[in-house]
Amino acid sequence: MQLTKLDFDRFEDEASAAGVLLPIEQTHTWATYQGTIEGRTPWGCFRIDREDGTPAAFVSFMDHETHGYHFLRSFHGPVWVCEPTPEEESEALAAISSYVHAHDHRILFVRLGVKADLPECQPVLSGVPYDRTVVVDVTGGDDQILARMKPRGRRDVRKALREAPITCSVETEQGAADFSPYYKIMCQTGERDGFTPAPMSDYQDFLRILGPEHSMLAVGRDQDGNVAAWSMLSIVAKRGVRYYAATAPGAGRNHAADKLVYFECCELGRRGCEDYDLMAIGSDFSPSLKGLNEFKTKFCKQIAEVAPDRDLPVRSVAYKALQLARTVRDSARTAPGDDSGERRSSDKSAGGEKGEKGDKGEKGDARPNPKGGAAQAGVAAARSDLLPVILGGDVSCYAYAREFHEAFGVRSAVVCTGFIAALQHSQILDCVSVPSLDGPSLKAEICRLASQSPAKRLPVVASTDALVQTLEEIRDDLPENVILPIPSREAFRRSSDKQEFARLCAAHGLRTPKTRVAHLAAGERPQLEAADFPLVAKAARSADFARLYAQGFKKVYCLRDQAELDALLDALADASFTGDLLLQELIEGDDTHMGAITLYVDASGKLRLFSAAQTLLEDHAPTMRGNSVAMLPRPMPDLVSNVEALLKDLGYAGFAEIDIKRDAKTGEWVFFELNPRVGRNSYYVVAAGANPMQIMVEDLVDGRDADLVVADGKALYTLVPNSLLYRYLRDPQLYQEVRELVASGRVVDPQRYQADSSTRRNLDVTLTEENQVRKFRANYPKPTDSSF
């Protein structure tokens, strides 16, 4: 066999003439969509000819650039004219390998669908391929569609039609114009199921580029008109494929998903489609996907087999090096003393459907010893007098629970409205669901926990400023056995006041950025001079701004001129935002100029913990700016006395975290804000040699006095694959320092804990981490001098 290169028009025409139905992923439309994703480029489409010149198959490829190398990917290709024999597949693979090897020296391997288990192919280096799916026959009308389902499927659909309080419709054009109402549900689904959704633009581009002819957004709305569930489909010729889906909290309990799937089947049938591919179920080939089977298989009595993805090495030596690197990495992760467990890349879906893939990264983890080096240590003997209560449902809460477990061998109660999968499947904590995180709900739940354990002390740790504020409001109504490591109301008020914080910093020799406050409630519209730009704009209180994220607003803005400021003010006015807006000078420097200081002040006002870190990389998702994802603990002795004096001036007690940035021009540290909590990345302090929760309990529960602990041991703290981190380290010395820490095993990821390791939880964490690769590709593909 041999390859003949074609342009897309001829490729699609010849496939049609040969009676081949190309899947959407093999079309020009799909290549256009994929080309909008960073690191992906259409590489070419080909006819695979037999020796007699007749076409055997058609295939198109995308060039994927990742981790410094290139490979080709053919989604659901090759597409064969007739079902191939293993010998024919082998001949086609030889022709593909020969062509690629001769025409592009960068390509190390080709990932494509191969049905036979051939010796020239290898299991994929990353991802979870599948060999089975569910394809629903949607011909014959609504009744026939229902009649062909399994009895369980018919029962659930009929129950949904009777009871599910949603109305289903197609909203493709609305979603292409403004995806924010649907993205909100995707974010809720991601928080619940433990994955990070793609940027909103990815979903909107899917609908915009594929258009109503090749895509469909099916939506179920509740009685109040709110989006309860949605599915996004691709459509080509006579087949629909379910690509993404999301459900609002609680929607799954009333069979909303069953009603929506049935609606999709009927709608596709009305459009002239013949079948509907629900995309991937588990099997012995892909056992990790078996959790999808119960829901999907009830809609069809037959299971369809498909050619699973396999890797075809083109440059065998380089490919073997990649395999060896993965083997060494996996061995290191599962060796004694390593907390990381097994890392896999997988298709993670919203609501069980196919999601975007993250690229394989490399990162180990180990438990730090008291000197800050990475070495395995045992869990402390369990204390019977403690019940930690953690408020929130994200990765920071898992770190807090791990700190309590390591220090005292206790399970924590994590209280929230929803939880990421890393929490849901943990063995060191109990997830406690509440209807709301408002004062009455939290008060009732904390009181309930306290009354159930009257002999225990309950230290309560909050994960956000808003939750600390709620604790301030209810603190006088909580039982005596509840412990709050938070400042007094007055200290909280003063530290939260940006102008007061700036004044106190100045009084203690600490620089803050020049800041103007725009009081939008009073109708203020600042008119600035050209010299005032560029500047950074953000809400004075992030809790007030959170509701706007679903509308596409970002957490932080970099504004270059008055026109951009006016546009932002207009948008905020349209969104009815009336909070205070901070306008701060832009401090030059990329992410590596950012930093954090973590502190604990005991009940007597004595500083008991000081730990500081240099940020290596921040999250650049629009709603997550300012959250570090990789850090190095750093000694900052020159700041200890000034910060201690500042806290005394505030009359502060409890945990605190201060955000700082080193001015690239002067080298001076600039202080931005004080957060009245231990901070999202508190586990870097453990990596540096001290456990914040242990220090707090020794003070507030045990009443023990102790000297100041300065935690500054050497280690790499990271929530992202090392390979991703390396891309953003432009300073050669910093890059070398990080590589040496990795090589010596001094790497810590709070999510990967050997005492809480299981196949399900390791997979959940891996999916969460690998989503970071896609997020950075979309939001911050290359480092910049300002980090914007």
Image (cartoon, grey):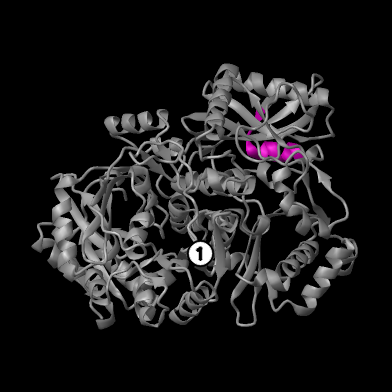
Q: Quadrant of residue 87?
A: top right
- Residue at 56% x, 34% y: name it: 334
Magenta-tinted stretch: 5-15
Towards the viewer: 657 or 177:
657
Reply yes or no: does residue 9 show up in magenta: yes
Towards the viewer: 503 or 213:
503
Residue 735: horizontal and vertical position, in percent?
33, 32
* Quarter containing the N terminus: top right
Please state if 574 lies on the left or on the right of 320 as rendered: left
Towards the viewer: 4 or 216:
216
Reply yes or no: does residue 732 show up in magenta: no
Residue 653: horizontal and vertical position, in percent?
26, 66
SS for callout 1: strand
Residue 208: horizontal and vertical position, in percent?
56, 57
- Residue at 63% x, 29% y: name it: 110
Asked if residue 236 shows in the view, the reply is: no
Asked if residue 535 shows in the view, the reply is: yes
Q: Is residue 57 above or below residue 218?
A: above
Q: Which residue is mark 1?
A: 414
- Residue at 51% x, 24% y: name it: 106
